[in-house]
Image: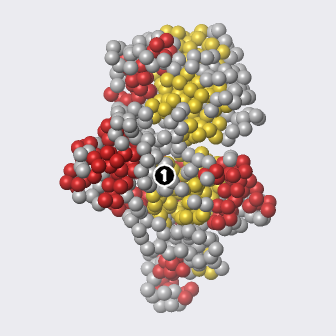
């Protein structure tokens, strides 16, 4: 996914090409060929790689482990590992300059809630001298048990195993029949307290040796029928280990390529492939990867985050949430619109069926639609930025764009340019198109009507509306089939590269903090909001006691199918005529009684993320019924300044809402840290 302009300037050091000389070259058009000729490389096609490329040469030599010798002639060790990565996981490259590691296995004494790893990399070990220190894991070496490295030429982070016992491993993606990890000789995988080494592997069987755990020392051969591993005695590998799920993982034979695969079938603690044997001690990391170093697990994230779900004083929990660091949309990533981040909070009413459905399906439906429209969206992005136009278009750009370009080039080279605050290595984008906006009355500052403008914004917003309404249709069909789905709100964010869309249905809320103040937030869909009341009345409905038809407390929601069929579906023709004449229930002759009273159409805002953006909060009305927007921002900033722990922050805020301010509702909060250590500024 590298643009040639990246590679061109990385080959030149700043002392050979000064900032002023660079500026002259940009303004003089000398770099037009590079600027205009750049494009995104095609995403890796894992299916097109030969199996022989995936580590068929056996163990790496010591030189190869150090990255100094090639495999198969001129190819470097890292290049060979890159091929293996693409065959196994199909990972894509992201132009990120930092990642966040968060513990997935917690123990008392692991004080750091998250570790920020920049381009300088990080060592993982037991001693505090390591950038990632885990003093409670006795299986770790004191120093450099494993290392995370950044490769500038590939714009990617790598996990390197340093050759110790209990080394580095990658969690296998869960899913029955998901065949990504082909077993090869000398490969090692682990499940629970047991590890397994592939002794031999051919087209008819695979021989495994148990290296640790209750069955240590045993050898088992698995034929074409495959085998399951787990705690229950009906597995071919029945292992008395409480760390295992009843059915934990399986080995499957694929006749299409005469190969055996290790698959996780949805275990609680995961199945891990170790970076030894064919994986040669090195793995290119992707967002949402889970890694294991020693006995300590970490997730790989774009943003630090915290999530709290509290039932409060309710008898049941009807909220749900979703947070996905990267939807792994290959075509959007290749078009430089990735990584794609999604998060949402869903507040159910009348039960948790709809909120649970949304947390499981809304992001998946959106991901499919985004990938289907990837080509159109990438073209829209290029059209909006003007970055990929012809040479004449480049020469005709305004001086403001040239200034943006100069800042970008200087940041790539480590130089300084006016406006280059963070030095992010990414293509320049024009500022958002200013739009008229309304600032609501009250004490909260900020904006509730941001629009990026441009073709990309228009297309993404249209796509989100379509997907949300189609998902609502899926929920209504389940209701028609006899399932009690009830309803749910939804407040969600979608981030493409450095652009964010806030979509809201109902009275859950999203807010963005910029520079210590509320900058953007969604508006609640309440029946007595003037424009919502007008829409309800236009469909022949009414609002009484702040509720739709005196019953529903929100004016937009997923589900609640009975409110979406139109009043004419529930009354006879005589009553309908009476309504139109102003009779029954004070009807309105101008109303369209076939229209739905309730809708799941989201209100959408969009804006470009800025370096001073600190965090985003998504929460249900349980929080915002007792806290104002500004109070939430100040509470988060104070808590993060004191404890630097996003998870502790949301848990504290939930407790305050319930116990100090007497919230009687469920309280769900998702906090996303956009600017690491913003509290130190």
Task: Report x, y in % for residue 92.
Answer: 42, 36
Relative to 377, 349 lies left or right: right
Relative to 137, 303 lies left or right: left
Residue drawn at 53 percent across, 38 percent down: 118
Secondary structure of the residue carrying numbered label 1 = loop
Task: Report x, y in % for residue 466.
Answer: 41, 60
334, above or below 563, in the image:
above
Residue 644 visible in the displayed image: yes
Relative to 649, 186 lies left or right: left
Q: Which residue is mark 1?
A: 421
141, above or below 433, in the image:
above
Task: Using a 10 Å C-alpha cutoff, classify the residue at mark 1 as few (fewer than 14 neighbours), some (14 to 19) or many (20 or more).
Answer: few
Q: Nearer the viewer, residue 506 or 512?
A: 512
Find residue 243 and report its image quarter: top right
Task: Report x, y in % for residue 15.
Answer: 38, 37
Residue drawn at 69 percent across, 39 percent down: 112
Find residue 514 and report its image quarter: bottom right
User: Which quadrant of the rendered structure holds the N terminus?
Assistant: top left
Q: Nearer the viewer, residue 352 or 110?
A: 110
433, above or below 243, in the image:
below
Outermost left residue: 392
Q: Nearer the viewer, residue 544 or 92?
A: 92
Residue drawn at 43 percent across, 86 percent down: 590
Residue 320 visible in the displayed image: no
Residue drawn at 34 percent across, 47 percent down: 20
Q: How many marks?
A: 1
Q: Tell me how the rendering is colored.
A: secondary structure
């Amino acid at each position: 996914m590298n643009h040639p302009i990246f590679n061109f300037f990385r080959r030149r050091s700043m002392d050979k090409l000064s900032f002023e000389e660079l500026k002259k070259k940009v303004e003089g058009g000398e770099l037009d060929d590079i600027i205009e000729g750049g494009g995104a490389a095609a995403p890796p096609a894992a299916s097109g790689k030969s199996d022989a490329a995936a580590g068929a040469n056996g163990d790496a030599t010591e030189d190869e482990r150090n990255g100094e010798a090639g495999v198969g002639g001129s190819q470097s060790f890292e290049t060979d590992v890159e091929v293996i990565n693409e065959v196994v996981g199909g990972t894509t490259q992201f132009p990120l300059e930092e990642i966040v590691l968060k513990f997935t296995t917690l123990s008392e004494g692991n004080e750091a809630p998250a570790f920020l790893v920049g381009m300088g990399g990080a060592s993982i070990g037991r001693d505090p001298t390591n950038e990632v220190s885990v003093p409670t894991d006795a299986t770790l070496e004191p120093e450099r048990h494993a290392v995370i490295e950044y490769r500038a030429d590939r714009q990617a982070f790598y996990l390197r195993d340093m050759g110790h016992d209990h080394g580095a491993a990658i969690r296998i993606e869960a899913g029955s029949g998901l065949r990504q990890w082909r077993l090869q000789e000398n490969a090692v995988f682990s499940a629970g307290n047991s590890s397994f080494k592939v002794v031999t592997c051919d087209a008819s069987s695979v021989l495994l040796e148990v290296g640790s755990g209750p069955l240590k020392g045993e050898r088992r051969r698995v034929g074409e029928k495959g085998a399951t591993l787990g705690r229950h005695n009906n597995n071919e590998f029945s292992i008395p280990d409480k760390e295992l799920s009843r059915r934990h993982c399986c080995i499957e034979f694929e006749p299409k390529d005469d190969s055996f695969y290790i698959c996780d079938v949805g275990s609680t603690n995961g199945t891990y492939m170790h970076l030894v044997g064919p994986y040669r001690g090195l793995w290119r990391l992707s967002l949402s990867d889970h890694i294991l170093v020693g006995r300590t697990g970490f997730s790989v994230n774009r943003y630090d985050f915290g999530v709290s779900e509290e039932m409060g004083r309710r008898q049941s929990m009807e909220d749900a949430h979703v947070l996905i660091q990267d939807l792994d949309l290959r075509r959007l990533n290749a078009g430089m619109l990735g990584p794609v981040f999604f998060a949402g909070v869903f507040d159910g009413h009348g039960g948790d069926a709809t909120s649970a459905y949304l947390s499981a399906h809304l992001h998946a439906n959106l991901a499919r639609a985004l990938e289907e429209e990837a080509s159109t969206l990438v073209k829209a992005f290029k059209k909006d930025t003007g970055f990929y136009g012809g040479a004449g278009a480049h020469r005709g750009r305004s001086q403001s764009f040239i200034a943006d370009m100069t800042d970008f080039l200087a940041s790539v080279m480590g130089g300084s340019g006016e406006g280059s605050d963070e030095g992010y290595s990414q293509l320049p984008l024009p500022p958002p198109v200013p739009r008229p906006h309304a600032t609501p009355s009250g004490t909260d500052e900020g904006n509730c009507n941001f629009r990026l403008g441009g073709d990309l914004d228009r297309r993404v917003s249209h796509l989100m509306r379509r997907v949300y309404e189609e998902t609502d249709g899926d929920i209504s069909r389940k209701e028609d089939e006899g399932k009690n789905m009830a309803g749910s709100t939804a407040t969600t964010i979608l981030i493409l590269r450095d652009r964010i869309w806030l979509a809201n249905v109902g009275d859950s809320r999203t807010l963005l903090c910029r520079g210590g103040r509320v900058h953007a937030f969604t508006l609640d869909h309440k029946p007595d909001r003037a424009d919502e009341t007008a829409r309800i009345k236009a469909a022949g409905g009414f609002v009484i006691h702040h509720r739709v038809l005196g019953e529903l407390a929100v004016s937009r929601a997923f589900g609640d199918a009975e409110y979406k069929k139109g009043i004419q579906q529930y009354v006879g023709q005589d009553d309908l005529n009476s309504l139109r004449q102003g009779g029954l229930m004070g009807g309105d002759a101008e109303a369209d009684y076939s229209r739905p009273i309730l809708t799941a159409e989201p209100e959408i805002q969009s804006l470009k993320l800025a370096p001073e953006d600190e965090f985003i909060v998504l929460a249900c009305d349980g929080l915002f019924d007792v806290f104002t927007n500004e109070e939430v921002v100040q509470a988060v900033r104070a808590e993060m300044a004191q404890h630097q722990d996003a998870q502790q922050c949301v848990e504290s805020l939930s407790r305050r809402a319930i116990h100090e301010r007497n919230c009687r509702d469920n309280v769900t909060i998702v906090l996303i840290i956009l600017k690491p250590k913003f509290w130190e500024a």
